[in-house]
Amino acid sequence: MTAREKEVLELIKQDPMISQNEIAQRLSITRSSVSVYIGNLIKKGKMRGRGYVISEDDYSVVIGAANFDLIGVIDVFSNGTDKVFEEGNTFFNDENEIRIHFGGTAKNVAENATRLGINTKIIAALAQDLFGQEIARECNQHSISTEACFFGDNLTSSMYLELRSRRDYIHTGVANVSIQKHITPEFLETKSGVLKHAQQIVMDDGLPKETLEYVTATYGRQKQVLLLATQAHRVNRYCDFIDRFAYCQFNFRSAVALARMESISAGTDMASVREIARRLQSIGVGNMLFPIDYDKLCFAGDGYCNVYKSPSPKPDPEYYQGSRDALMAGLMYSIAHGLSLDEMAAFECACREATYRTRDMVNMSLCPELIKSIRAEMGSLRPI
């Protein structure tokens, strides 16, 4: 909205019966100008007709997985080795941990976005079992609306089981996310009212291909539809219509796979990074973000490809893994607030650093005060 449109909307919120003449007098503009501003507000979805019915506050929708996560952290042997996953072994150690989280890509993104002040709704498939009820309760406790979720009887909740050591990265993990297949185009048709009035729609690549295609075909030209690509083997789910997304956030492997440059590693030179971005743009990717190692982020779009390096020390691998969902929440915030590219990069780097500092692998509790503090420490950020 323009500054003047915001003024007009604020007057109407204060007095829904106010006349166009009175608005014109209050703002020292002509009545015909007021009519134009009101027309623009209707087109932008801020009002639902000339009866001055104000639309619901701006909100974003995140579509994807909401899981019950069980994380086993096995302490290393006294000699410092990590070879603890030998067949048939059971490990009893006072230092071992079993952590329970309510996670999943969509749930984590939605929680992080809510903590950044974005009014967020989630569309996920939840079973009517104990785990599904707890996931819904957890979402609602964090002010994430679950009113548009799919709730199914006689189904198994989306679950993730992981084993890791303290010194290293994930050793093994298994997920059962088959319930996501119920987020179909037919189901989303019943939620068209929620999607139609959303400011942003974010989807993770774990959704069925037909669902990704339906949302982008139905809403991609009307609003900001964002893709969070998390797994390289899923690129075929969206590569045929990648041009419909307003912004794509890839993990590095997904970016490399989509660009058909499988031999490139995360520690690659900047020339290769720019070649990845060029190839992605050539197949229709518009604006994009992808991390390079733990401290660099690549932003690319029409006519630019910038790499920013944050001054953060290298984090423990388990906290580095969790920064992905915080980056997407930061991207949602940056787009919604119209940040410049340099401002967006600084904000994203601060979001990533915040996840390192909170040392919370699944539910990264982004705090606006912490983001502000980190940004102040970093100062201005310029591409390398």
Image (cartoon, rainbow, N blue to C red):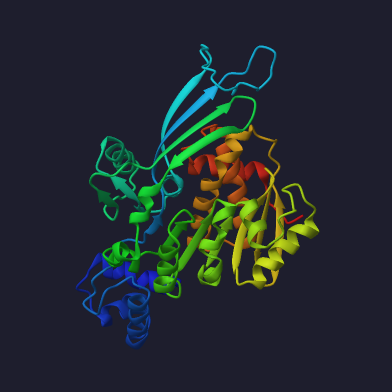
In the rendered image, residue 130, in percent from the top left (x then y), is placed at: 27, 35
Indicate left or right for 191 with 249 as reference. left
In the rendered image, residue 309, in percent from the top left (x then y), is placed at: 71, 49
Indicate left or right for 290 with 19 as reference. right
Q: Nearer the viewer, residue 224 or 83?
A: 83
Q: Residue at x 59, y 50 (%)?
A: 348
Count all numbered tags in the image, as a single digit.
Answer: 0
Above or below — where is 82 with respect to 3?
Answer: above
Q: Residue at x 33, y 70 (%)?
A: 46
Location of the C terminus (image quadrant): bottom right
Q: Residue furthest front?
A: 88
Indicate left or right for 339 with 119 as reference. right
In the rendered image, residue 103, in percent from the top left (x then y), is placed at: 42, 40
Quadrant housing residue 235:
bottom right
Location of the N terminus (image quadrant): bottom left
Q: Nearer the viewer, residue 296 or 126?
A: 126
Q: Residue at x 27, y 39 (%)?
A: 133
Q: Residue furthest bottom?
A: 32
Quadrant housing residue 31:
bottom left
Q: Is residue 345 visible?
A: no
In the rendered image, residue 64, in percent from the top left (x then y), is placed at: 41, 53
Above or below — where is 2 with respect to 313?
Answer: below
Q: Is residue 296 visible?
A: yes
Q: Residue at x 60, y 40 (%)?
A: 353
Quadrant housing residue 318:
top right
